[in-house]
Image: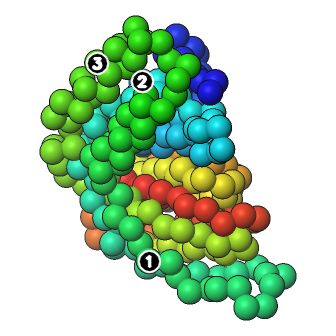
């Protein structure tokens, strides 16, 4: 079985991984408040970790696990355990629609939301890493010892997942059918910056729109990325002044699973 990644190559790969989708009004990094930077870092870390999980998971064949990477999985688990507590995205109203040319009989029921817990994902990922370590005969005894030590080290991490950050982040995980669109709507404080992040097992179109004036902050097909927005533009946020935000997640072709985060 060939490994798709090694730890030596990961820094270069991660440097170009996260797709930062366009924002109508971008803020300079050196002028962004500390909480904005933290939110961005957490969102990008979640996206990166879930992509690493996909790349390292591998596929079961008659010959065993193909295209799997222990390196990717261990790093993904570590990054997930560095995230703060992620609460369910419960305050958003959601509905499902389908393309006009979706075949008759296609299930259009809204898939049940699944709670996204970084520590649970990390445990599942490390379990897969041990499975690869146990079944891959191409790994030398010396490397097996090193991998075992890496996995054990991450398993012992207490993690940041016990730490709650007030105001965010939140996430939901859902299955999506081919041709389906899942639409989320919630109120956001006017002039207060926010972001949406997504990872998906299939390409999806992510649209983030301010209803007032139909301002499109993001419109991209991706399997993982972040989108920043400031409803109403830069100004002084007032808690009782809100604007409606709409987020569309559309699967043009295959069915898959996505994790949508917001903060």
Residue 199: x and y, percent? 54, 50
Q: Are marks 2 and 1 in contact (CB under 8 Å)?
A: no
As drawn, the residue found furthest toward the right would be 101
Question: Which residue appears at 66% of the width and 55% of the height?
Answer: 202
* Residue 241 vertical position relative to residue 204 in the rendered view, above or below: below
Question: How many marks are shown on the rendered structure?
Answer: 3
Question: Toward which corner of the image does residue 6 lie, by quadrant?
Answer: top right
Q: Nearer the viewer, mark 3 or mark 1?
A: 3
* The disc label shown at residue 112, or none: 1
* The disc label shown at residue 41, or none: none
* Residue matched to label 2: 30
Residue 95: x and y, percent? 53, 82
Secondary structure category for the residue under label 2 = helix
Question: Toward which corner of the image does residue 249 lie, by quadrant?
Answer: bottom right
Residue nearest the observer in this picture, 67 or 154: 67
Residue 39 in view, yes or no: no
Give the mark nearest the N terminus, 3 or 1: 1
Residue 55: x and y, percent? 58, 37
User: Is the N terminus in the top left, top right, bottom left or bottom right quadrant?
Assistant: top right
Residue nearest the observer in this picture, 136 or 159: 136
* Residue 70 vertical position relative to residue 89 in the rendered view, above or below: above
Q: CA distance from mark 3 to mark 1?
A: 38 Å
* Residue matched to label 3: 149
Residue 3 in view, yes or no: yes
Colouring method of the image: rainbow
Q: CA distance from mark 2 to mark 1?
A: 40 Å
Residue nearest the observer in this picture, 216 or 17: 17
Question: Which residue appears at 50% of the width and 72% of the height?
Answer: 184
């Amino acid at each position: 079985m060939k490994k798709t990644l090694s730890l030596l190559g990961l820094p270069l790969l991660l440097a170009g991984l996260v797709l930062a989708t366009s924002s109508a009004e971008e803020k300079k990094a050196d002028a962004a408040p500390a909480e904005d930077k933290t939110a961005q870092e957490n969102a990008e870390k979640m996206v990166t970790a879930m992509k690493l999980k996909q790349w390292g998971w591998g596929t079961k064949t008659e010959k065993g696990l193909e295209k799997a990477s222990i390196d990717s999985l261990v790093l993904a688990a570590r990054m997930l355990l560095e995230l703060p507590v992620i609460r369910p995205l419960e305050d958003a109203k959601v509905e499902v629609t389908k393309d006009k040319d979706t075949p008759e009989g296609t299930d259009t029921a809204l898939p049940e939301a699944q709670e996204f817990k970084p520590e649970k994902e990390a445990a599942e990922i490390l379990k897969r890493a041990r499975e690869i370590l146990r079944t891959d005969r191409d790994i030398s005894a010396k490397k097996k010892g090193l991998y075992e030590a890496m996995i054990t080290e991450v398993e012992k991490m207490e993690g940041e997942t016990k730490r709650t950050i007030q105001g965010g982040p939140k996430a939901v995980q859902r299955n999506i059918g081919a041709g389906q669109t899942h639409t989320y709507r919630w109120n956001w404080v006017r002039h207060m910056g926010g972001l949406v992040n997504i990872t998906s097992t299939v390409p999806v179109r992510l649209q983030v729109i301010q209803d007032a004036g139909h301002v499109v902050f993001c419109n991209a097909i991706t399997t993982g990325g972040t989108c920043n927005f400031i409803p109403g533009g830069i100004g002084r946020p007032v808690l009782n002044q809100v604007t409606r935000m709409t987020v569309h997640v559309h699967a043009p072709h295959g069915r898959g699973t996505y994790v949508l985060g917001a903060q």
